[in-house]
Image (cartoon, rainbow, N blue to C red):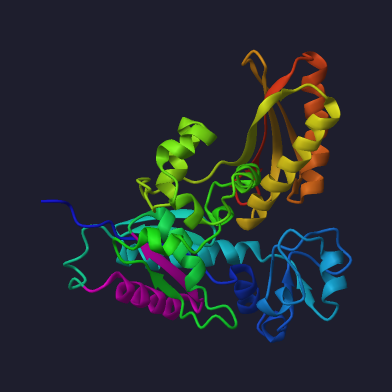
Amino acid sequence: MSPPPRRVLLVDADAFFVAVARQVDPEGAGQAPLLIVGGRPGSRGVVCSASYECRAFGVRSAMPIARALTLCPDAMCVPVPRGACSARSKDIQAVLARFAPVVQCSSIDEWYCDLGGTEALYGHEPLQETAHRIRRAVFEATGLHVSIGGGTSRLVAKMAVEVAKPKPGTGADGVHCVPPGEEADFLSHFRLADLPMVGPKLAEKLERMGLLRVADAQRWTEAGLASRLGERTGEWLAQRVRGIDDSLVTPRARQKQVSREDTFAQDLDDDAVIERELLRLAVRVSADLRRQALRARTVTVKIKDTDFKTRSAQRTLSGFIESESSVAKAAGPLLRQLRGKRRVPVRLLGIALSHFDDEPE
């Protein structure tokens, strides 16, 4: 007898930083439809989050505050309420733990839930109904709205939550669950670039092959994709476009660092090119940091040389940083220090941030 289909949910707090800022300051931020969270006007900060009304003006996460106010001059800007965000995140996770035997915190505003083995507990009701009950329970306990995507894997749940979000004009009600057996059809409507872990380089390569949408790749066999992309990538993509993802939902220990790294298709030896790659990594890792309402004091740069020798350099700053410019400013001298000691081509480059501002001293 085959096991029952997996029951995986992804719970995503809607406009989390904006919602918490409004709770913390109901008379100020709570009354501002045009709200930007990330810093005060005139600061050198960047947008952590913005209300849907601001997004209609083109305001986006990671945008400099000054640029955001140029696009939306009537917006109110407030700092990230870090303590309140951390507390609300824990409150939401506590509610989810009442419903799911396994809850994995993916970020400060996202949680995977594995409801495997709870079918009888919930009277064998459809996963969609359970998700709606969880959504109501979170709002009753915290006053915050969440969107929930569900399916037989983390991948499908991740994609479903984007459909579930009740954005203006979508008609969505906050929950979208994909029934077992319908994964491939559901995913076929997305762009390949929308799939998790399909980065810009892979998306560009797929586009050169004439593959823009998931449906395009679904028409290829695994062998055909492997012949063009390599065995490992081809196999991985063939499974993902059909909704196959065996990764487990597992509780995580407290995060100690945020990092990004890239292995280059060809080893790099030009300092200017390597520094541009460092800046690109700084942009990505700082965005990850802000997404979790964190700031860091320690910056680590890692290099793997052409002969696979791995080296790193680290610096702990006097104050906390979060923007890409401050990360790049701290990482640049570390890269030059490593390059000065051993000038050989680089096959991998990475940046890690640690020593967060919510850690006990």
Q: Residue at x 76, y 15 (%)?
A: 344
Decide if residue 93 is in sight here.
Answer: no
**Relative height, residue 103 to residue 140 (above, below):** above
| Residue located 65% across and 42% down the image | 201
Q: Reply above or below: 147 against 335.
A: below
Query: Where's the C terminus, which quadrant?
Result: top right
Residue 179 in the magenta stretch? The answer is no
Looking at the image, is 56 positioned above or below residue 239?
A: below
Q: Which quadrant of the structure image shows residue 168? A: bottom right
Query: What is the x, y in percent for residue 272?
Result: 85, 30
Horizontal side, residue 275 vs residue 353: left or right:
right
How many numbered marks does the figure carry? 0
Q: Quadrant of residue 259?
A: top right
First to last magenta residue range: 125-151
Question: Residue at the location (71% across, 36% down)?
Answer: 299
Q: Is residue 249 left or right of residue 68?
A: left
Q: Is residue 51 above or below residue 64?
A: below
Q: Position of residue 355 (x, y in %)?
A: 64, 41
Q: Which is more toward the observer, 215 or 198?
A: 215
- In this orientation, which residue lies closer to the viewer: 113 or 182? 182
Which residue appears at 34% of the width and 77% of the height?
A: 133
| Residue 146 shown left or right of residue 7 in the figure | right
Q: Position of residue 210 (x, y in %)?
A: 59, 49
User: Is any part of residue 50 visible from this angle?
Assistant: yes
Query: Is residue 144 one of those drawn in magenta?
Result: yes
Identify which residue, 343 or 102, lies in the foreground. Answer: 343
